[in-house]
Image (cartoon, rainbow, N blue to C red):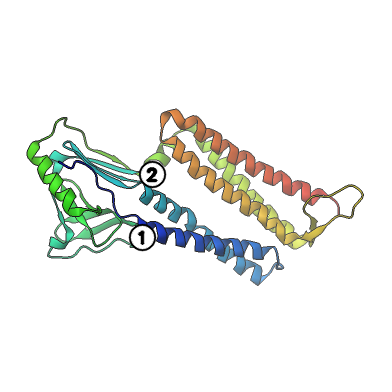
Amino acid sequence: MNIGHFPPPKRNGLIIHGAIILILTVIAAAGFFNLTRIDVGPAFLVSLLIALAAFVPIPFFAYRAYSLRQADYHLDRDSLAINWGLRVEDIPLSDIEFIRSADDLTHPIALPPLPIPGGLLGTRHHPDLGSVEFLASDSKKLLIVATAKRVFIISPEDPAGLAQTFARATELGSITPTDAKSVYPSFVVTQAWSSSLARYLWFSTLFLNLGLFVWASLIIPSTPLVALGPQFAGSALETVPSTQLILFPVISLLLSVAGWVAGLYFYRWEKERVLAFIVWGSSTLSSLLFLLAVLFIVTNPI
């Protein structure tokens, strides 16, 4: 019996998510770079809003791409395990009432919000099935996994193979009964939030970045020029428009977001949690160093 892995289609979804991330990155980088070339005013504000609007969704799509890359459906004689990034659902075979194609339904299932290939995620209400949760990548290969409590929509590369394997495994019976398990991405955040050290590092990094943004915003209108870059003894100071100071809070924020996500990744495992605190501590230190760098620049006479 072909018991094993039945991964979802990934190629098209990874290409689309990669293209979206690349486009948003280019727009955000162009917007932030443009801030260093224009004076404070309406154009500066518009460029800042465009850059932030392009940057904010990048971690969201990056996580969706990572989740798709790691996605898998594993079926054996004891359970069906659905792994989608940090989302894990382990369903004992005895709890599954049926697995069938979504095409067999009288009323079609509405796709979840933002139905991008490679990331059909979210919940919908169906008149016959009630609330259903999508953990799928391809709308053309949807399978319904129904239990007494929940209904899931998945999309293995070989839907018929998974359905046939499930029927065969049900006939053979379970070897070692397992317990149902549900893990959500928010569970990792909740776990980390319970640590006072993690909260301290998160808030310290947040306030340092907010302070850096506010300080840079106050300096730019009142200081037309600043000395930025390497300076050599005996040579004239090289000055640039103060709008380039906006790069400091922007880079600090990017590093902080990347560090926060990386820390959550390590925090999932008990033995790796020291690395999570090291990463979060490094983010706090990095934000402080950016703050000190701005202090050094504005106090350096030109």
Q: Would residue 147 be found to the left or right of residue 296 on screen? A: left
Which label number is shown at residue 245? Answer: none
Residue annotated with mark 1:
12
Residue 223 in view here: no
Quadrant of residue 250 in the image? bottom right
- Name which residue lies at 18% across and 49% down: 162
x and y, in percent, of residue 105 in the image: 13, 62
The 10 Å Cα crowd at callout 1, few under 14, some 14 to 19, many 20 or more, is few
Q: Residue furthest bottom?
A: 42
> Earlier along the polypeptide chain: callout 1 or callout 2?
1
Q: Secondary structure at mark 1?
A: helix
Residue annotated with mark 2:
186
Q: Would residue 51 be found to the left or right of residue 162 on screen? A: right
Q: Who is closer to the viewer here, 179 or 221?
A: 179
x and y, in percent, of residue 170 in the image: 10, 41
Q: Who is closer to the viewer here, 28 or 195?
A: 28
x and y, in percent, of residue 245 in the image: 71, 56
- Name which residue lies at 22% across and 55% down: 131
Q: Who is closer to the viewer here, 19 or 34?
A: 19
The amino acid on which the numbered mark 2 sits, given as a three-letter code, is: Ser
The 10 Å Cα crowd at callout 2, few under 14, some 14 to 19, many 20 or more, is few
